[in-house]
C-alpha cells in the first residue's frame, strides 16, 4: 500500500459538470456535477484502481509529469492524490483479535483496564505506519 499522485484531465461537459480521465491509467473515468464533486470522484476512482492493481500484483505505471500533457481549451489538468493504505482501511475495515503482552508496570502505571488498551495500541500502529485520521 502506498501514496500516489497522478495527473487527471478535467474536461467540461456540455451538459454541465466535468468528465475526468487519467492519461496514465486505461479505463479510469469518472465525472462530477461540478469541479469539487469531480475531484472527489477522481480521488475515489484513482484509489480504487490502484488498490485493485496492488492487490492483484499488476504493475503500476509511473505518472506522467502533468506539464507534459497537452491540454485542450477549457480543460484543467491537475494532480489527484490517493493513499491506498487509507483506502484499504476504509474498504476492508475488518478487525482481528490478537494477543499482546506488555510489562506489568505499564498496566499498573496507566490505571487502565486491559480492554482500554485497544485504542492506544491502534493509534500507536497508525502512528508507526504514518496513517492520519
Image (cartoon, grey):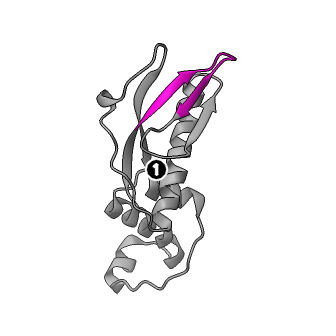
Q: Is residue 125 left or right of residue 25?
A: left
Q: Main secondary structure of the magenta part?
A: strand
Q: Quadrant of the N terminus?
A: bottom left
Camera-nearest residue between 90 and 103: 90
Q: Is residue 125 visible?
A: yes
Residue 119 appearing in the image:
no
Can you give x and y, in whole percent of width and height, for residue 46 in the image?
50, 46
Out of 56 and 120, give the one closest to the viewer.
56
Furthest residue to the right? 15
Taking the view exactly as shown, the residue that stands out farthest to the top is 73
Residue designated by label 1 = 133
Locate residue 97, reporting x and y percent.
55, 80
Name which residue lies at 45% across and 34% down. 8
Give SS at disc 1.
Answer: loop
Identified at 45% across, 66% down, the residue is: 122
Residue range (magenta): 7-20
Task: Name the residue: 35% across, 85% down.
Answer: 104
Position of 9 with respect to 13 (left or right) is: left
Taking the spot 56% from the left edge, 56% from the top edge, the residue there is 90
Residue 15 forms part of the magenta stretch: yes
Q: Is residue 121 above or below residue 99?
A: above
In the image, residue 35 above or below residue 125: above
Residue 112 is inside the magenta segment: no
Q: Residues within 10 Å of mark 1 (few under 14, many from 20)?
A: few
Residue 82 vs 88, above or below: the answer is above
Amino acid at each position: 500500500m502506498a501514496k500516489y499522485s497522478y495527473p487527471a484531465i478535467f474536461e467540461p461537459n456540455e451538459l454541465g459538470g466535468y468528465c475526468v480521465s487519467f492519461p496514465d491509467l486505461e479505463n479510469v473515468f469518472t465525472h462530477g456535477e461540478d469541479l469539487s464533486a469531480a475531484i472527489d470522484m477522481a480521488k475515489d476512482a484513482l484509489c480504487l484502481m490502484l488498490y485493485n492493481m496492488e492487490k492483484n500484483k499488476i504493475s503500476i505505471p509511473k505518472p506522467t509529469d502533468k506539464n507534459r500533457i497537452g491540454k485542450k481549451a477549457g480543460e484543467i489538468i491537475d494532480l489527484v492524490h490517493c493513499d491506498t493504505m487509507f483506502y484499504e482501511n476504509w474498504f476492508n475495515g475488518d478487525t482481528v483479535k490478537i494477543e499482546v503482552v506488555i510489562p506489568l508496570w505499564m498496566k499498573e502505571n496507566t490505571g487502565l483496564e486491559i480492554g482500554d488498551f485497544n485504542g492506544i495500541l491502534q493509534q500507536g500502529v497508525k502512528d508507526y505506519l504514518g496513517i492520519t485520521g
